[in-house]
Amino acid sequence: MSKRYREPLDDVEVAAEDPTAFTWRGHRYHVLQVLGHWYEDESWWRQADGLPRHIQRTDLWRVEARNAGPTRGVYEVVRCGEDWRLDRIWD
């Protein structure tokens, strides 16, 4: 089961385009392994009023990570443009 958060990440370390560590709610998490990576291409959509809306490319990673304590879990980390967020956590 997963919980959706969609909260911004304070800091993300990246190597070869993959996140290697991130800070969320003041806690530092180190990525143990990348379980998956996919992206949604940028595109144009029409809003209800007919005006175009540009959607940026969005990269998503599912990672196994742990913090300094015993907490270890599966997290979905998302990058859209220059912004990073934590999207989901799996129990």
Image (spheres, rainbow, N blue to C red):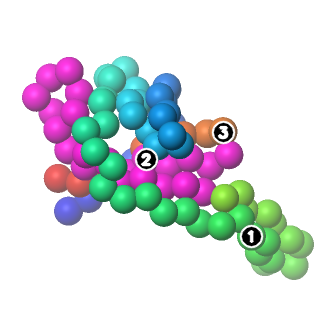
Residue 54 location (% of width, % of height): 79, 63
Element type where label 2 sits in the image: strand
In the image, taking residue 28 as reference, residue 48 lies left or right, namely right
- Residue 26 or residue 33, whichever sits in front: 33
Residue 29 location (% of width, % of height): 31, 29
Q: Amino acid at mark 3?
A: Glu
Residue 42 location (% of width, % of height): 71, 65
Residue that mark 1 sits on: 43
| Quadrant of the frame with the N terminus | bottom left
Residue that mark 3 sits on: 82
Mark 3 Cα within 10 Å, few/some/many (few <14, many 20+)?
Answer: few
Mark 1 Cα within 10 Å, few/some/many (few <14, many 20+)?
Answer: few
Element type where label 1 sits in the image: strand
Give the dominant element type of the magenta stretch: helix, strand or loop.
strand
Residue that mark 2 sits on: 77
Tell me the CA gap for discs 3 and 2.
13 Å
The reply to whether residue 44 is in sight is yes
- Residue 87 or residue 39, whichever sits in front: 39
